[in-house]
Structure formats: structure tokens, C-alpha cells
Image: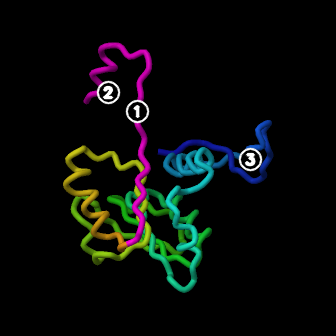
Amino acid sequence: MGCACAKPTTEEQDDNNNRFPIPDENVDIPFSQMLHYVHRFIWQGNFSSPVDERLNSVSSKARVLNVKCGEGAWLKDNASLYPSADFFGCDITATLQYDVSPSFLKADILDGLRYYDKNTFDFIYLQFGLYTENEWQEKVIKELVRLCKPGGWIEIMDRENIFHNERETTQRLGKA
């Protein structure tokens, strides 16, 4: 799924001193890439875990895994911000659209990521998992913990759907 968005090329400031992109031409941006840039703007960064120093360290050569990386917007963004770190992405579809340093593995975390050894990554990032409660408990969390080095960080960013003015049909949909 794609959407027409404006390509940000310059920055201005609003009344609250927040920086925001000013478009100068229209381009097609995949929906998941657009979401990445919207979330980066809202959160004023790509992640909240305290791993910035580790990712910048030339001597430790941090390893980062982006689970469910999609087209790779988060990977591309962070690989350019942290050139000292090694970035890896995995997704069930091979849609990585960037020719940058991240390595890509077509895999489903629900099947396990046996390609990677235990304690491989300093930082693991998963966004919009959309797994069932049982899948989270029985598979996803266990696999993320297996892959994360001792002292490493696992960050999961997901959304919560909150319905307002729900009627009976909306309540049933929300529970489905």
C-alpha cells in the first residue's frame, strides 16, 4: 500500500518551536515508511532505549536487529545515523527497499530465528507486532530474549486501539 506524500526537503518551526518538514514536491511513499516518519516526528527520535552511546561506539561494533522491518525505513534511518553499528532486519516478506548496510533475513519470528545464535544482538527493535497474546508469551518474547545479549535492550513499540462513542457493533469488532 502506498500513499502520495510530500517530500520533506526544508524545515521550519511552528509556534511551539517544533521543527517540521516543508514539502517541495510530491512523491509516492510506502505506507509503512510514512508511519516511520510520523512516529519519528511524534516521539522526536527512532527509539527510546538508552543505547545511543553503544550504537556510536566504534570499539564495540553494536549489532541491532529490527524484527518485522517491512520496507526498511527504520533500518535505513538508523544505519545512516549510526554507521559504527551493524544493522540486521527480518520480515516474513522480502520487501526491503534500500541498498544500505543492513543485512536482511526473510523469516517469521513465530517460527524462530535459528539463523542467529543466542546472545547475538545488543539492541532489538520490534514495531507493530500484531501478535495474539499467546504468540507474544509463547514465541515472540522468548525468541527476542534468546537473541538479546546480556545487558542488551529489547524495545517493543506497538499501538493501542481506543474507540470513542462505541456502539454495539464497534464493541464487538474491538473484542474480535
Q: Which residues are magenta?
A: 151-176
Residue drawn where x is 55% and y is 65% of the image: 76
49 is within the stretch colored magenta: no
- Residue 125 drawn at (x, y percent): 43, 60
Q: Which residue is mark 3?
A: 19
Left or right placement of residue 129 versus residue 63 in this view = left
What quarter of the picture does the C terminus occupy?
Answer: top left
Q: Quadrant of residue 46?
A: bottom right
SS category of the residue bearing label 1: loop
Do callouts 2 and 3 mark residues in contact (Cβ within 8 Å)?
no
The quadrant in which residue 133 appears is: top left
Residue 126 at x, y = what percent? 40, 56
Three-letter code, disc 2: Gly
Is residue 77 depicted above or below 88 in this figure? Answer: above
Distance from Cα at disc 1 to Cα at disc 2: 8 Å
Disc on res. 161: 1
Which mark is on residue 174?
Answer: 2
What's the amino acid at mark 1? Asn
Q: Nearer the viewer, residue 131 or 56?
A: 56
